[in-house]
Each structure stands twice: as C-alpha cells, then as structure tokens.
Image (cartoon, rainbow, N blue to C red):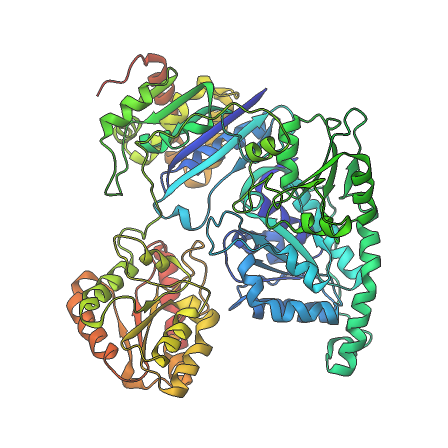
C-alpha cells in the first residue's frame, strides 16, 4: 500500500492541520509517513502545499513525483489546479468551492469549477459554508478531510482518534466541532453527485 | 515508539540526547525549528541547556566556541547565508580546534524558498577542512547527532552538519533510540595556546589541521554512513548520491537496491577509495547531489576531466533549483509519463504582507513622498518588509544581505544621490545594522534610516527580537542626534502626520533615524503584553 496525497491552499488556511491529522492517524496505525511542508516566506498569504505519503513500507522521497498523486485535497479551487501536474491518471481531486481572492488577476470562479470538472474523478463541496453553519468557518479543513475519507488508506476511526489527540489541548468544544465537521464531510461525499453553482 | 517530527526536530532531540549543554542561533528559514524545539523541550529546561536567541550568527558561533572551550558540548544553528556572517569565526575555529564537542548546523535552501541565494555550505566545510555530515532522512538527522559530537571530540574539530529545506521541513516517524548522555563537566583545555591564534601559535595549529586530513578521509572510508553497494546485475551505471538526493534515487529504483551500484555519501571529506572502486566497476558515473556540483567537480579532478562522469556540470541534472524525484528519474534513464499540463487559468499567488501589517502603513507613507524625492532611492533589507519590493507596494528597490540597507544607502549618498532612505527591521538592525549606522553617523552622511520595528523576528515565525526596548538607546549611543531620532506609529489614521515627519527628515542633510513602531499583527495578546513589560523594565 502506498498513498500519495497533495494538500494545497493559501498560507493560513489550515492545510498543515489536515496533514497533522493524517500523519498522526497513519503513525498510530503503524504505517510509515513522510510529510513535507512549507515554512517561512511563502506562508504569508501565498500558495502553500504539503506532500503527504503513507505506506506500509519505508518511504524514501519526501516529495511526491509528478504524475503520482492519488489525491489532491485543496481548501481552495485555484490552488487545487496548481498541482494538476502531480495527479495520477486515475487520481482524485477534492476541493472546497470557496475561493480565496487576494490577487488582482484571480480568475472567474465558474471557469475554475469548469476546469476541475474536466477531470472525471472530482469532488467539489461547499466546505466553508458547512463549517460556518457548524459555528466556525475554520473547520472547513476537517469537512474536506471527512469528504476524502473513502479515498484514504486509513480508517475513519483512526482519523477521529487523531482529531481527538491533536485538538485535545484546545478543549472539548474544539474537539467536538472538528469531529462534527469531519462527520459532515463524510456525509457530503456520500451524497455527492455533481457540484451545482 | 516512533515520534512524528520534522527533520529539524529530530536533529534537535538528537543533540539533547547527545549531552548538549547549549544551542546558539539566530532565526532563519529553514533552520529555525531546531532551536525552537530545544526552547520548548522540558528536558532542556530541566537540564539548564542554554537556548536563548543570539543577536546574529557570528555572536552565536563565538558563544558556542566559548562553551566548547569550557569543555561542554555546544551547537550553533543557522541558515546557509548565516554562515557568511559567522564565517570569520568558522574559518578560525577549525584552526584552533575545539575542546568540548561543537556541531555547526547549517540548513541550505536550494530553490530559494525563503532566501536570496542557494549557496552550498559543503564548500565552507571543505574550505575550513572540517568533516561534514549530511543526513538523508529524519532518523539519520537524529542518529547522526550523537556521532557528530563524538567525532568532534575525538578529532578536536568542529563538525559541519548540513541540512536542506526538504529534510528540515519534512515530518516522519523517528525513534529516539539513544540513551540520553550526561552533559560534560567543565574542563578547560589542556593547553590554551591552541585558542590563542597569534601567528606563532596559529602556524602550529594550521599545520595540525592540514595533517588531520588523511585521518578525516580514513574516517570517511570506514564510516557506516558512506555505503557502497555494487550491483551484480548491472555495471552500466554507478550512482553517487548524497544526503537527501539519495532518496530520489531510491524512489526511482523502487527500493531495488541491486538495480544500480550506489555509493551513498553522508560523511565528508570524500572517501576516495570507495569512489575509485565504484568508478572502476561501472561504465558511467552519475553524481546526484543537492546544491552545487561539488562532488562532480572533485571527481573530474580525481580522474581527469572525462565523459564518464555525469551530473549537473554535464547537463544530466539542472544547475539551479532543488532536485526532485522526476529529475533524478530522467537522469537515471527511468521512464516517466509526461505529467499533465498546468492549466493556464492558474495565476501566481506570491506571498504578501498580512492584513493590518504596520509595514504596509509605513510603505504607504514613503510612497506618498516618492514623487517629490524621486524613485529608486529606497534601500531594503531582510525580513517581511522585503515583500515591499513586490506590487502593489513597489516601495523597496534593493535586498542583498542583513544590514545592507543602511550601508548601501550610505554608499549611494556618498556618490551624491540625495534623499536616500534605508528600511530595516528591528531585529535585522541589531543583527547587522548598528555598525553601518555608526559609519554614517561618523561622517554625518545625509541618509534617513527607517527602523520598521515590529518587536519580533516576524518572517521566521515571530521569535524574540534582541532589539526590543533598546532601539532608542542604541541609536543615541551610536551618536544619532536626539532631534533627528523620531518614533512614529504606522497607522492609517497617522498617515498625514507620518508623511510630514518623514518629509522633514528625508530633506535633513545628516543622519536621521525614524523608528516606525507597531508590534507584528501575528503576536498574541500575551506576547504583546510581555514585550510591553520588557520595555517598561528597561526604561
């Protein structure tokens, strides 16, 4: 078993939290993990990515080769498309529909959705809206993680435990919010047929 | 048990477990998390390991050498360009040698993710004639530390520990398997002449250093970290892979260790015999190294320039930017599908200053004045405010090295350019700006120095700044005239007032210093309070 996942978004959108949950869950299942991340200058409102690799054997490269990603999980639609060169032929795309516009030449968002829909394996969900309804738009990352759960090599229960483990220092309320967000994501993906905007 | 840690954190834990007594550092991407890990470590606190930030890399390295002089194990940590700042002591402490183990950790940044160049620190190690260790994964980053300190004490030299961004900032499960070693007691050098490099003693020391080379090479020949595996199946290609580059080779051969002959290098100086063995065994040699083509050059030197050696110089791999598995795949002849094209619709998203950042208000004030003072006169420095060189602000015209804003402004003013401005951060100012300001004050050079003071080392994650509460007294001490030392608060509501103050000082025919003071928006309320209290206690 070998899973290559690219997480993408804009600095500050919480992709490193998704990475931390995945890493922790995988390690708790006794699997090997490598996860590269971006620190420093690019974190300031720029494009950020994290490569997460999970395997039952030793992993060498910290970077996923181009054309080898099983899943690109993005918290922002344009940032999803930035990593298309990494996608495997039968790989999956998963993104929040919510755009983060902090540049003047940001494309028309419907054009972005159209481009994503050109790939057969895609899921576009309104994760930020769902998280807002739950009380905190920041939990959009856990909604997305939930929506990806059937595509991951780790069990949902391991992920729930990892969420509990990581958010525990922030208190019961935060743990529960994130767990509920995760469940909402699972349900959204189950019901998903087509993104309509 | 495996602990999920960054390469930087694995290294730091390795140092603690190796009996570290002190870490000295100035923050710099990608090295920062090493010192931060030790700062947050319970063991470090209990064992009284020194871990406060230093003013710059040179003061840090000298302090580490002092701790080694006293017999204890010390570590100094920096990014690659930090070694330029510390190079004076670095080049001389290989001549003096060390007493307690001393490890110099330098994190290179190939591809310049957060740097202004991609210099390769291995050249410094070669230049200073010290051993270099280069781990290829997180577990090795941990394991090598014990060995690094032992080696340093055995051969009485500092050891250079080279990291690169991708290893520093990649997490993996790491076993902290060493039994924690006790710290050394204080034990002064048997003969202090080794550290007194007046010419008479320096000559003796330098000869000792040069004579250590064969010993160091022999260490590399027998090191378990330099592993040669000769393939029984295929003699067409032999690969020399160092540090993290080894991973990209293994990724391509898909763990089939017998696919090609591979010499993994993690300890320098190079093991010449092992290299010769690989060279004689294979038809062609490919060198895969992250950074400059150092080994490839040395190989050309060993075996006369010839076509048998491939690498960055031959064009098999690119000379700039970091390596990745695809590039190495191409160079080793593995077929990869052509990756999908990046959709045209994707636009660049460069980093930018945070919402509400004080630097932005400062730049807006300066920009208001540009039509009257003229363009291309703002000299910048290293920090978040360097983003002022990008649209939409376009305020800053230069960025070279720590402190260069003030001194370049001075040189331009000496050339006759009027109304020049230097913009420098508080921490960059205490790192390397103060001496340049003294030059300007001594000559009454007409420049305006704006210290954009956010009370932290913001770019690397808001570490403590040595400048907190001290800027005014430093400037006055250096000799800035009190009437030309003015503090402003960069806020929208103060815009007109700030423009007026700046205008007056920019037209002043002497040195003016404007402290533009507002804490970084990323600091927590508690941290801001802590800074307030520190300032109050200093006044």
Q: Position of residue B469 (x, y in %)?
A: 39, 72
Q: Position of residue B44 (x, y in %)?
A: 62, 56
The count of marks equals 0
User: As displayed, is residue B276 above or below residue B362?
Assistant: above
Residue B19 is left or right of residue B318, and the answer is right
User: As displayed, is residue B175 above or below residue B450?
Assistant: above
Front-lying residue, B503 or A25: B503
Residue A128 is left or right of residue B52, and the answer is left
Question: Would residue B436 be seen by someone viewing this image from the given angle?
Answer: yes
User: As displayed, is residue B517 above or below residue B179?
Assistant: below
Q: For the C terminus of chain B, which image quadrant?
A: bottom left
Front-lying residue, B105 or B311: B311
Residue A70 is left or right of residue A114, and the answer is right
Q: Position of residue A54 (x, y in %)?
A: 56, 27
Q: Quadrant of residue B157?
A: bottom right
Q: Quadrant of residue B10?
A: top right
Q: Position of residue B488 (x, y in %)?
A: 25, 71
User: As displayed, is residue A170 above or below residue B447?
Assistant: above
Residue at the image point whose x is 72% and y is 71% from the top:
B69
Front-lying residue, B223 or B531: B223
Q: For the N terminus of chain B, which image quadrant?
A: top right
Front-lying residue, B353 or B377: B377
Residue at the image point whose x is 37% and y is 83% from the top:
B476
Question: Would residue A11 be seen by someone viewing this image from the given angle?
Answer: no
Residue A99 is left or right of residue B244, and the answer is left
Residue at the image point whose x is 73% and y is 45% from the top:
B178
């Amino acid at each position: 078993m070998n899973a290559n996942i690219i997480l993408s978004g804009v600095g500050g959108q919480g992709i490193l939290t998704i990475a931390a949950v995945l890493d922790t869950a995988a390690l708790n299942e006794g699997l090997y993990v490598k996860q590269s991340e971006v620190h420093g200058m690019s974190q300031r409102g720029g494009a950020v990515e994290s490569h997460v690799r999970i395997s039952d054997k030793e992993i060498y490269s910290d970077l996923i080769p181009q054309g080898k990603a099983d899943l690109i999980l993005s918290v922002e639609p344009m940032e999803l498309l930035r990593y298309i060169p990494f996608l495997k032929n039968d790989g999956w795309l998963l993104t929040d529909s919510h755009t983060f516009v902090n540049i003047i030449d940001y494309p028309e968002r419907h054009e972005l959705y159209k481009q994503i829909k050109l790939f057969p394996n895609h899921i576009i969900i309104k994760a930020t809206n769902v998280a807002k309804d739950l009380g905190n738009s920041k939990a959009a990352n856990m909604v997305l993680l939930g929506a990806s759960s059937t595509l991951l090599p780790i069990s949902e229960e391991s992920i729930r435990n990892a969420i509990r483990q990581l958010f525990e220092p922030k208190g019961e309320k935060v743990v529960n919010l994130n767990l509920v967000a995760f469940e909402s994501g699972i349900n959204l993906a189950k019901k998903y047929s087509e993104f309509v905007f | 048990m495996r602990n999920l840690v960054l390469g930087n954190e694995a290294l730091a834990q390795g140092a603690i477990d190796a009996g570290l007594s002190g870490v000295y550092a100035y923050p710099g991407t990608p090295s920062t998390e090493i010192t931060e890990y030790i700062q947050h470590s319970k063991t470090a606190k209990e064992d009284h390991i020194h871990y406060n930030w230093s003013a710059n890399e040179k003061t840090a390295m000298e302090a580490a050498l002092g701790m080694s002089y006293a017999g204890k194990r010390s570590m100094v940590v920096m990014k690659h360009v930090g070694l330029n700042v510390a190079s004076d002591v670095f080049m001389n402490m290989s001549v003096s040698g060390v007493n307690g183990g001393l490890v110099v950790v330098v994190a290179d940044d190939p591809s310049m993710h957060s740097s202004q160049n991609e210099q390769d620190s291995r050249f410094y190690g070669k230049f200073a004639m010290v051993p270099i260790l280069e781990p290829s994964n997180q577990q090795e980053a941990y394991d090598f530390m014990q060995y690094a300190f032992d080696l340093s004490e055995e051969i009485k030299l500092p050891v250079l520990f080279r990291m690169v961004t991708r290893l520093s900032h990649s997490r993996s499960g790491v076993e902290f398997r060493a039994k924690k070693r006790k710290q050394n007691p204080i034990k002064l050098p048997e003969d202090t002449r080794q550290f007194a490099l007046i010419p008479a003693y320096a000559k003796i020391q330098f000869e000792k250093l040069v004579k250590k080379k064969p010993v160091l090479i022999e260490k590399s020949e027998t090191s378990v970290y330099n592993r040669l595996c000769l393939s029984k199946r295929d003699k067409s290609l032999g690969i020399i892979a160092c540090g993290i580059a080894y991973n990209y080779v293994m990724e391509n051969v898909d763990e089939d260790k017998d696919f090609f002959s591979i010499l993994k290098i993690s300890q320098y100086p190079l093991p010449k015999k092992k290299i010769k063995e690989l060279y004689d065994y294979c038809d062609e040699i490919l060198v895969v190294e992250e950074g400059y083509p150092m080994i490839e050059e040395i190989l050309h030197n060993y075996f006369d320039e010839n076509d048998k050696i491939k690498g960055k110089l031959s064009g098999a791999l690119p000379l700039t930017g970091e390596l990745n598995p695809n590039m190495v795949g191409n160079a080793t002849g593995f077929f990869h599908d052509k990756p999908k094209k990046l959709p045209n619709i994707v636009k660049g998203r460069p980093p930018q200053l945070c919402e509400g950042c004080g630097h932005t208000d400062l730049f807006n004030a300066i920009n208001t004045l540009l039509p009257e003072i003229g363009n291309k006169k703002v000299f910048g420095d290293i920090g978040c405010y360097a983003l002022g060189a990008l649209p939409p602000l376009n305020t800053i015209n230069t960025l070279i090295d720590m402190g260069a804003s003030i001194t370049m402004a001075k040189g331009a003013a000496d050339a006759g350019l009027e109304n020049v401005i230097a913009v420098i951060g508080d921490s960059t100012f205490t790192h390397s700006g103060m001496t340049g300001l003294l030059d300007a004050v001594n000559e009454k050079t007409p420049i305006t120095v704006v210290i954009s003071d956010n009370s932290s080392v913001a770019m690397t994650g808001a570490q403590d700044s040595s400048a907190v509460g001290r800027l005014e007294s430093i400037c006055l001490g250096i000799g800035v005239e009190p009437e030309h030392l003015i503090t402003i608060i960069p806020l929208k509501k103060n815009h007109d007032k700030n423009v007026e103050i700046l205008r007056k000082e920019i037209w002043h025919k002497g040195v003016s210093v404007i402290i533009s003071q507002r804490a970084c928006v990323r600091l927590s309320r508690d941290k801001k309070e802590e800074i307030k209290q520190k300032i109050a206690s200093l006044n």
